[in-house]
Amino acid sequence: MKPSEIRATLDRLGSRPTQSLGQNFLHDRNLAEWIVTQLDLRPGEPWVELGPGLGALTEFAVARSANGLAIEKDGRLVPELSARFPGLEIVHGDAAEFDLRELFARGPVKVLGNLPYYISSQILLGFTAEPSPVQSIVFTLQRELAERLAAEPRTKAYGALTLLLGRRWRVQYLRTIPPTVFAPQPGVDSALVRFTPRPPDEVPECDGEQFRKLVKLGFAKRRKQLRNNLAGLKIDWPALVAHLGVLEATRAEELSLAQWIALTNFVAGQPAPPGAAGAQDVHGEIFDVVDEADRPIGRATRHEVHARNLRHRAVHILVFNARGDLFLQKRSRWKDKHPLLWDSSAAGHVNAGQEYAPTAERELEEEIGISAPVEEIARIAAGPGTGWEFVRLYRARHEGPFRLAPSEIECGAFFTLEQVRRWTAARPQDFAPGLLECLRALDAPAG
């Protein structure tokens, strides 16, 4: 729309741009089309637009894929969007409060939007926080924020936000956008930025919560040396700086992302995850081999039972909170089976000579760091769906927080059972087969 068309449309709707909503309507159609092309939308791909306004970007997104969802906070504009794009799903709501868990069933989604400056950081961190159903983002942001996100070490713009988002996401500053393409014109330049998830093996793994705490501490007083900002922690500083290959007087902004991850793992004393050099070999674990009635008939290594499809034993635990939401974990990239798929709250094999229930309690502690009573709710026979495991399914209750084992779990979150059911129905390929069997047993009629 031209500026005059924007004014005419708003007049017809009895509306005016609202400063409290950060409304600046894009009127350059060539730029709008170019912005949408940066998302590389393919026919049928799911996408989400935040704050579509009068549909400047929506027009070109819908032309590429009809599988879209628009979230618009200004209720005055929703009827206009519905009339202009009749096949588009439109949610009247605040993108900063939108429940991202609703997007997992759509599959990995692409997200775009011209974000209000006053709330862009909150929205950006929300849509990139783990776990996220997002595979690509193109946002128009205030130029100053965009420069901070894409900054390099040893620059003024480089800071905590650069690292907190950059640990999991690649950030690409695409171009500067002048105020003149908006109506009304903002007082500062904008910038278009693209965010894409880093491949799992691009940077070393670390405890994400520990990383966040250390980065925030390190940048708390930017002009101070890093050792002073981290003085409250018991760190062997000479050993640390030798490990990182930096000077003792280094400051937070002088460390690269890889060095911040190395610092985090040094402080945590984290052992190498499976698959990394020096990791403990789990393939030598010994399990009971059982017959079709779950009676022990011998023993074999983990590798043997999997390679030969021998019947053995396992436990799965579903952890619910007081609201009835179910905690799911995303399996670590280092897992020998079903890496990066979603699984039960905790699960594990029953070692030779051990029993089911004590193993369930042990797995809760080892994988998600909690102690809670377990209640058996189902027994699942060994078969292809369980990887030839006899599974006993347990229920536990806990509100979190959880201490997730980095070598076992990529991330995790609570989901409503309805969200899980829609997700598993739409995208069963996102889940470990054992969890799908457990959910069928959970939903099976009693008796």
Image (tube, rainbow, N blue to C red):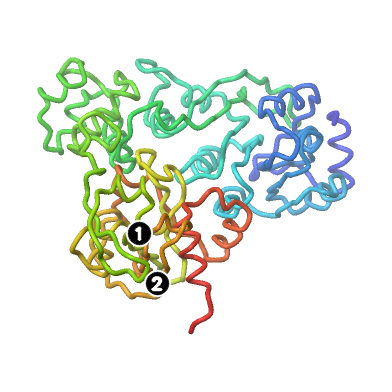
Task: Give left or right: position of 422 versus 91.
Answer: left
Q: Label 1: which residue? A: 311
341 over 436 or under it: above or below: above
Three-letter residue code for mark 2: Arg
Residue 180 or residue 153, whichever sits in front? 153
Residues at marks 1 and 2 touching, judged by CB atoms closer than 8 Å:
no
Residue 146 or residue 445, whichever sits in front? 445
Query: What is the secondary structure assignment of the residue under circle 2?
Result: strand
Q: Earlier in the sequence, mark 1 or mark 2?
A: 1
Q: Residue at x 75, y 34 (%)?
A: 57
Image quadrant where one finds the N terminus: top right
Q: Position of residue 29 (x, y in %)?
A: 81, 25
262 over 445 or under it: above or below: above
Query: What is the secondary structure assignment of the residue under circle 1?
Result: loop
Circle number at residue 379: 2
Q: Residue at x 27, y 36 (%)?
A: 214
101 over 154 or under it: above or below: below
Q: CA distance from mark 1 to mark 2?
A: 14 Å
Residue 260 or residue 141, whichever sits in front? 260
Q: Residue at x 61, y 60 (%)?
A: 422
181 over 289 or under it: above or below: above
Q: Position of residue 279 (x, y in %)?
A: 22, 35
Q: Position of residue 289 (x, y in %)?
A: 28, 59
Q: Position of residue 317 (x, y in %)?
A: 36, 64
Q: Nearer the viewer, mark 1 or mark 2?
A: 1
The quadrant holding residue 152 is top left
Task: Give left or right: position of 276 versus 180.
Answer: left
Task: Give left or right: position of 39 versus 78.
Answer: left
